[in-house]
Amino acid sequence: MTRVQQAIARNVKQGRKRVGLSQADVADRAGLSGSYVSEIERARGNPSVEALARIAETLGLRPYQLLLGEDDWEVRDRLETVSNMYRDLQSGMNSMLDEALRRHTKSVKPVRDDSDHRKQ
């Protein structure tokens, strides 16, 4: 069994468990046989690119993600965490700015336009 087979096996199994599907569910949704999916998860088969694409779609992944090593997932997870933190920070800042603008708008008295008065 090769490193690629091991990576695919691990990622298919983890992805399947993450979305709460059985091997039979994955096989059915991907249009594959249950024994084929089982072989892939045991790193015994050499899945075709088409099979990987179908499995990835079923698991909500992109096909390349089935080839990632464990270190690659760690980097991806950290990047996702940082991205989520940035999104939350940006959302919080926008809310604070909106609130400050509302407060400022309420505290400012309207300016009277004297231009019409001066013309008379």
Image (tube, rainbow, N blue to C red):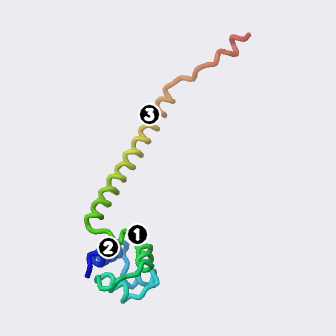
Query: What residue does disc 1 label?
Result: 61
Label 3 sits on a secondary structure element that is: helix
Label 2 CA crowd tier, 10 Å (few <14, some 14–19, many 20+) = many
Query: Which part of the image, by quadrant, shows the C terminus?
Result: top right
Which amino acid type corresponds to the residue marked 1 in the rendered image?
Answer: Leu
Say whether disc 3 or disc 2 marks the residue closer to the N-terminus: 2
Label 3 CA crowd tier, 10 Å (few <14, some 14–19, many 20+) = few
Query: Which part of the image, by quadrant, shows the N terminus?
Result: bottom left
- Coordinates of residue 116 in the picture (x, y in percent): 70, 16
Which amino acid type corresponds to the residue marked 2 in the rendered image?
Answer: Asn
Gap between marks 1 and 3 measured at Cα: 41 Å
- Coordinates of residue 104 in the picture (x, y in percent): 47, 29
Query: What residue does disc 3 label?
Result: 100
Residue 11's tag is 2
Residue visible at 29% across and 57% down? 78
Residue visible at 36% across and 81% down? 22
| 88 lies left or right of 115 | left
Residue at the outermost front position:
2
Q: Are marks 2 and 1 in contact (CB under 8 Å)?
A: yes
Gap between marks 2 and 1 measured at Cα: 10 Å
Label 1 sits on a secondary structure element that is: loop
